[in-house]
Amino acid sequence: MSDGTAVRLEPHEIALLGEGPRAAVTVAVVDLHLRGLVEADRPGTIRAGVVDAARAEQPPSSLAAAVHASLRAPAAPKTLVKDPDIRLAVALMRIPLAEAGLLRYPLLGATRAARRHVRDLRHVHPLPTSRHGLTDRERLLLVALHGEAALRLLVPRFALRAGLVRRAEVGGTGLLKHSPHGTSSGGGGGSFSCGGGGGGGGD
């Protein structure tokens, strides 16, 4: 297909088209966090958490699986994009996107159709005023579309501790006071032009 608009895109794929590999890895890290598979470690780093079979109904994406496997020791999220296995996962992500007309050969930058599609998704799914009542699926889509603004709203404590946002950009300590650990998401409305599902999670 030439314009790619009929392709069902996952949040990490949308992030790749919108902002590149690091944004896609960020979405993968948040996905793992919402599944309880990644936790903040020392300031600015993350570590692999204990796998909970009860939360593994929907397998993570191949990119998220590569991120999880790479965490043999605590690491800064911004360095993960340089890991050879994660770079391979990103490269494999690009193939179907290029075949769908969403990435240009040979440099594999987003096509005009892809950029337009991401802009349309941002318009259809604006950043909400509250993170409550959102599914994990919706949180990941919002992070893919709105980047740091979504991180500060939806997973503020984890984003700060893990180094996904710079400390000065979090907007003060008030966010930390209003982001109780383990808050579950549930319900949530709306349908998206990207597939998959999510389980429960919190910040």
Image (spheres, grey):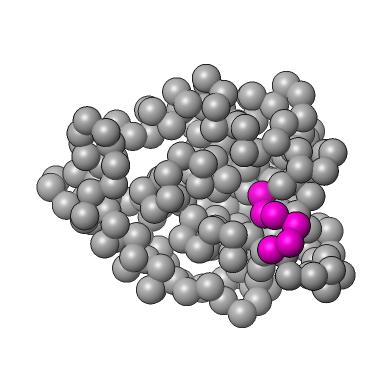
Residue found at the very far left of the displayed protein = 2
Residue in the foreground of this view, choosing between 123 and 200: 123
> Quadrant of residue 92 in the image?
top left
Residue found at the very far bottom of the displayed protein = 129
Residue 23 visible, this orientation: yes
Q: Residue at x 34, y 60 (%)?
A: 118
Specify whether 183 is left or right of 189: right
Relative height, residue 163 to residue 52 (above, below)? below
Relative height, residue 173 to residue 39 (above, below)? below
Tally the numbered discs: 0
Q: Residue at x 47, y 26 (%)?
A: 87
Specify whether 36 is left or right of 194: right
Residue 96 visible, this orientation: no
Magenta stretch: residue 6 in it? no
Q: Position of residue 166 (x, y in %)?
A: 70, 54
> Quadrant of residue 185 in the image?
bottom right
Q: Residue at x 29, y 42 (%)?
A: 109
Q: Position of residue 150 (x, y in %)?
A: 59, 64
Q: Which residues are magenta?
A: 164-169
Specify whether 10 is left or right of 147: left
Quarter containing the N terminus: top left
Q: Residue at x 33, y 51 (%)?
A: 8
Relative height, residue 201 to residue 70 (above, below)? below
Residue found at the very far front of the displayed protein = 168
Relative height, residue 107 to residue 171 (above, below)? above
Quarter containing the C terminus: bottom right
Q: Position of residue 146 (x, y in %)?
A: 50, 63
